[in-house]
Image (cartoon, rainbow, N blue to C red):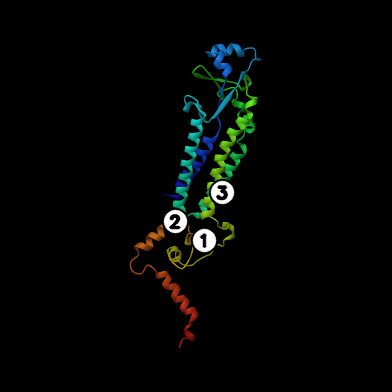
Amino acid sequence: MEQKQIERDFDNMIMTLIERVEVNQIVIISKMVDDNFKTKKELDEYLTDGKNKIKADSLILFNNVDKIDPPSHEVEIDDLRKVFNEGFEFLADKIDQQCQLGESLYEINEMIRNAVKVVDIQFDKLNYKDWFVQKMALISSDTFYVVVGHHRVAYPSVHFNFDTLMPQIDLYFKFRKNLLRELKYRLVDIFSKYLLLPDIEQLPVIKYHCNPIEICELIEALVTSKYFDDTKKLKTFFMEIFQVDRDLYKDKKLAIKKKQGNRSSFLLKLSDDFDSYVYPKNKKQ
């Protein structure tokens, strides 16, 4: 799979998880409503004077309440866990496949760093106070619901009294924050496993006077050797300092395999240069 597609899939999954963990609706469960009102019309009349409020006995935080009928805290939590576990596996699998090649580590390095920053921003905002401020423009629309009979009815937040439930609200937001925290830790684990690389700016750019296919032959010879450890990072370093991008490397690697005769012709040139350096002609006996 091409690197650009990998990046798109990765970014899309990060955004999918961030959007899934957001709170878009709060459903209020009220014993007072259950005991006294059978229809929305009856409840509307009760709320007309603006002084009466709906007393909340419990509530549920949802990303999309329409997907869960009847509203259930347990189903919402189970679905959140399922979505995040599948997301973790998807991200780890895609990154693991690419890192095994060792040809795009710096691109993946930057991709994960950016993802961690995005997760951190969302993590800091995931609390009731910030959420309420962010939703102020929508507070009069379909954000707060109460169950009346067998229907969910939307009302502005001013019609509710749920002050006593703030600890519960904070706990539910913390659960969502913990999912983002785990996402960040998973990303950092991948980063630590594969991508502890020096910044690109610290690596020199080395000019060369041979053909790109010969540089790729040199890199491939080094990384396929049994004499070096961590050859994937070694490949990454050489691709960076010689400014060999992934597409060029793949193209030249294929050309090397298709070469007729000796596929290590550049290594032979290096060997001749080395012999000439060690044994100059005028010193040979």
Which SS class for mark 2? helix
Label 1 crowd (10 A; few <14 / some 14-19 / many >=20) = many
Q: Point out the frontmost of discs 1 and 2.
A: 2
Measured in 3D between alpha carbons, the distance from the residue under mark 1 to the one under mark 3, in whole angstroms, is 19 Å
Q: Is residue 237 above or below residue 20?
A: below
Residue reaching furthest to the right: 51
Q: Earlier in the sequence, mark 1 or mark 3?
A: 3
Q: Bin the neighbour count of mark 3 within 10 Å (Cα to Cα): few under 14, some 14-19, many 20 and up.
A: few
Snapshot quadrant of residue 214: bottom left
Question: Which residue occupies 56% across, 41% down?
Answer: 180
- Residue visible at 42% across and 69% down? 266
Q: Quadrant of residue 179 in the image?
A: top right
> Hey, what amino acid is under mark 2?
Leu
How far is disc 2 from disc 3 in space, using C-alphas?
A: 20 Å
Q: Which residue corresponds to mark 1?
A: 237
Q: Residue furthest left?
A: 260
In the displayed structure image, the side of residue 227 where residue 263 appears, left or right: left
The amino acid at mark 3 is Arg
Q: Which residue is mark 3?
A: 113
> Residue 96's spot in the image, x, y percent?
46, 51
Residue at the image position 47 percent from the left and 54 percent from the top:
99
Q: In front: 205, or 133?
A: 133
Q: Nearer the viewer's eye, disc 1 or disc 3?
A: 3
- Location of the C terminus by quadrant is bottom left
Residue 116 shows up from this direction? yes
Q: Which residue is mark 2?
A: 101
Q: What secondary structure is found at the residue carrying circle 1?
A: helix
**Rendering coords of residue 236 (x, y %):** 50, 59
75 or 210: nearer the viewer: 75
